[in-house]
Structures are given as structure tokens and as C-alpha cells.
Image: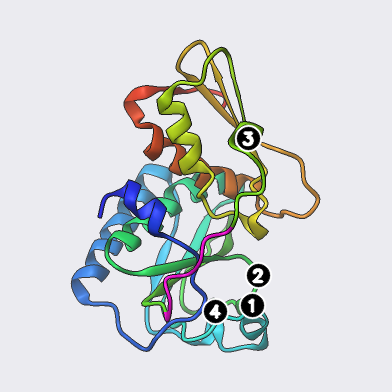
Amino acid sequence: MTLQEAILARHSVRQYIDKPIEEDKVQKLQSCIEECNRNGNLHMQLVLNEPKAFASGLAKYGKFSGISNYIAMVCRKGDDEKLGYYGEKVVLLAQTLGLNTCWVGLTFRKQPDQYQVLDGEVLWGVVALGYGATQGTPHPQKKGLEYYCQVEGAMPDWFRCGMEAALLAPTAINQQKFEFLLTNGNQVEAKTRFTLLNSYPKLDLGIAKCHFEIGAGKESFQWRVDS
């Protein structure tokens, strides 16, 4: 499965079966997490065989069940966009390995003895990980593609492909509060839109940028430096 195929196949899954993740897949996930941590100066951590985080009423409220594996999404304060970007790389790798995932911001109980959150860092949430009871279901797109972007002139095919991938990115309460701007032929800027409901706008933007980059192809464009 390619990353493009993983983007199409991946949906948020909240119910999991009691099946351990094979060691070779654990090693691939751990290697990817370590690489992303190095590249993004992050502190994501893989937690296995730990059911307490999703054993409380919070998890039941969120309709989560069967979760004993997750990734603790930890970064320095202010680095949440990078956390979304690199975290989604791990999520998509998991999909290519036949695993299911779900970004979780609030409906879990913190387990500080299972991962480190150092001074100056913050735990933004976790990514549930494992074999899903189902493969999840897609969310309907709220608006047309053009609502989420601005383009000077005709929209290039690569940009359209990038936007189609970005609109498949998971976002908090499916808000999709982001916008992509194309200028000077191949200069792309991504920015958040204002919302009162989303506590994770930069995290969501990082996830969307990861999807856009895969869909458009790195060779097709350049991120604006201030993007």
C-alpha cells in the first residue's frame, strides 16, 4: 500500500479487537517515530499493552473500546503544527502496515508513568493504534474543494491532487478549518481559519499539510517560508 492509498483507506477507528501488534510492525513504527522525532525535534512515544488510558468513563463517552496501544503525542510548547505533520506520517505508515488509528485529544485518561513529558513540553493527546473492529467510515466533505484554497490563475493538477488529499486529513470534530494558497506558480502557503470550537488548529494544519504534500508531490511545489 502506498501513502496515497493509505490516505484514501484511513478512517478514524474507535473500537479495536484483542490482537497484539506483531513485533516487526512495532519495530517499523518505532523506527518511524524516532526518525520523525529527530527531524521535527519532537517527543512522540509508542506505548504498548497499556489499557488504562481508555478504561474510564471518558473513553466510553467517546465510544472507544479495546484500546491498549497508542502513541503519546508530546512536543515542546508551540510545536503543535510540526507534531501534526510528523504524527500523521506515523499514522499513515500504520495504515500501510494494516493497522488502524484515531487521533484523540480529550477522551482518554493521562497515564504519566507510561511516557515522558519534560519541562517545556506538552501532551497534546494520543493516537489510538491497533487492529480495528471495523475499518471506519469516511466523513462527508462539508464544502467544495475551492472553498479551502485560493489560486492565482488556473488550478494545476498537482495542486488539485494535494487539496483532495488535504481534505481527507483528520481534524478535530471534522472542522477542516484550514486554507491553502497558491502564488507565483508553485509557492504554497497553508494557514488556519478562525474557529471557536477547535482547540487544535495548528495540529490540524500540520496533519493537512502532510496530506497535501503527499498528494501534490514534493517536487511540484515549495512551501512558503512563513507557512
Q: Is residue 161 above or below residue 52?
A: above
Q: Does residue 191 appear in the picture of this structure?
A: no
Point out residue 51 in the picture as x, y percentages from the top left corner.
47, 86
- In the image, what residue type sits under mark 3? Tyr
**Which callout, 3 or 2, points at the residue further toward the start of the chain?**
2
Residue at image location 49% in from the left, 71% down from the top: 13
- Looking at the rendered image, the disc whose residue lies closer to the viewer, 4 or 2, is 2
Point out residue 100 in the picture as x, y percentages from the top left corner.
40, 69
**Which callout, 2 or 1, points at the residue further toward the start of the chain?**
1
Left or right, 93 with respect to 156, comes to: left
Q: Are marks 3 and 2 in contact (CB under 8 Å)?
A: no
Q: CA distance from mark 1 to mark 3?
A: 28 Å
- In the image, what residue type sits under mark 1? Gly
- Looking at the rendered image, the disc whose residue lies closer to the viewer, 2 or 1, is 1
Q: Is residue 21 above or below residue 43?
A: below
Left or right, 58 with respect to 18, comes to: right
Q: Which residues are magenta?
A: 133-139
At mark 1, the secondary structure is: loop
- In the image, what residue type sits under mark 2? Leu
Residue at image location 44% in from the left, 52% down from the top: 88
